[in-house]
Image (cartoon, helix red, strand yellow):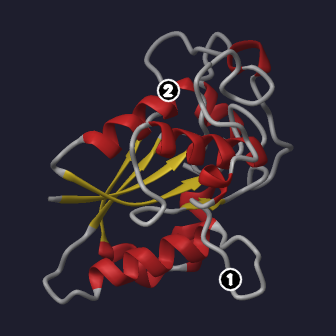
C-alpha cells in the first residue's frame, strides 16, 4: 500500500488525479492540499472536496487543506479560458460549492477555521512516518509547486518522511501556454 498526498489545483486534469487516487486499491490517500493555478485557491479547495465526494471518498477518510493563494514571488495567474472561472467550468453532476457534504471534507481547528495546507501536510506526513515502520509518503503535485516549496522550507525535518515527489510540469519542445512555458511552471517558476 502506497501512502499518497495530493497537491492539486482542480482543474480537469487534477479531477482525474483525485478520481484515480480515490479508486486505486494500492493507494491510501493521506490528504489533499490545494493551491492557486487553474482557478483561485478558494475554488480549487472547493473543487477538490467536490471531486472527493463525487468519486466516492468519505470526509471521514481524507481531508482537503487549502494552500497557497499566490506564487512565492509573482501575482497569481488563472486560466479561465480553459478551465472556466471556477476551475471546473461546464462540469455537471457535482455537488454545489456550499453543499454540506462538500464542506465536511475541510478539517477545522477549535475556532472553526479551516486547517491550511502546511499544517495538514506536516501533521499527516508526520503521523505516517511516526508509525515506526519507516513508512513514507509519496507527494504528487499536479499544480504549481508553491505548497511543496513552502513545505520543504518550513518542515525540512520531514523531508526524510517523503519517499518521492512526483510533479506534473515542464515540457519538451513547445510549451502549452507559450512557445516555451508549461502552465504549472509558469504559475510559480520559483517554486520547483
Is residue 136 toward the left or the right of residue 167 in the image? left
Q: Is residue 40 left or right of residue 184?
A: right
Residue 60, above or below 73:
below
Q: Where in the figure is residue 74, as x and y percent of width and height?
A: 83, 46
Residue at x 47%, y 22% (from the top left corner): 171
Residue 51's spot in the image, x, y percent?
A: 52, 39
Q: Is residue 127 above or below residue 98?
A: below
Location of mark 2 (residue): 13
Q: Secondary structure at mark 2?
A: helix
Please provide percent x and percent y for residue 6: 44, 51
What residue lies at 76% left-to-right and 75% top-to-bottom?
113
**Structural distance between the alpha carbons of marks 1 and 2:** 30 Å
**Which residue is most to the front?**
100
Work out whether residue 141 or residue 131 is closer to the camera in this orientation and state it: 131
Q: Earlier in the sequence, mark 1 or mark 2?
A: 2
Relative to 144, 130 lies left or right = left
Depicted 19 relative to depicted 41: above or below: above
Q: Quadrant of residue 88?
A: top right
Depth check, front residue: 159 or 26: 26
Question: Local crowd at mark 2 within 10 Å, few (<14), some, or many (≥20)?
Answer: some
Q: Quarter of the image for the N terminus: give it.
A: bottom left
Q: Position of residue 186 (x, y in %)?
A: 67, 32
Q: Dot 1 corresponds to which residue?
A: 109
Instruction: Indicate which disc residue 159 carries.
Output: none
Amino acid at each position: 500500500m502506497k501512502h499518497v498526498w495530493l497537491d492539486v489545483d482542480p482543474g480537469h486534469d487534477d479531477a482525474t488525479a483525485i478520481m484515480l487516487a480515490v479508486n486505486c486499491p494500492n493507494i491510501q490517500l493521506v490528504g489533499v492540499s490545494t493551491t492557486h493555478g487553474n482557478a483561485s485557491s478558494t475554488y480549487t479547495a472547493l473543487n477538490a472536496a467536490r471531486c472527493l465526494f463525487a468519486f466516492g471518498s468519505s470526509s471521514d477518510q481524507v481531508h482537503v487543506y487549502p494552500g497557497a493563494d499566490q506564487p512565492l514571488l509573482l501575482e497569481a495567474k488563472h486560466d479561465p479560458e480553459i478551465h472556466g472561472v471556477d476551475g471546473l467550468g461546464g462540469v455537471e453532476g457535482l455537488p454545489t460549492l456550499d453543499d454540506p457534504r462538500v464542506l465536511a471534507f475541510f478539517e477545522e481547528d477549535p475556532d472553526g477555521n479551516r486547517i491550511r495546507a502546511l499544517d495538514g501536510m506536516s501533521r499527516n506526513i508526520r503521523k505516517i512516518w511516526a508509525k515506526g515502520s519507516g513508512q513514507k509518503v509519496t507527494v504528487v503535485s499536479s499544480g504549481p509547486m508553491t505548497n511543496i516549496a513552502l513545505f520543504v522550507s518550513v518542515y525540512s525535518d520531514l523531508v526524510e518522511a517523503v519517499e518521492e515527489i512526483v510533479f506534473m510540469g515542464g515540457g519538451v519542445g513547445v510549451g502549452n501556454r507559450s512557445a516555451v512555458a508549461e502552465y504549472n511552471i509558469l504559475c510559480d517558476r520559483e517554486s520547483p
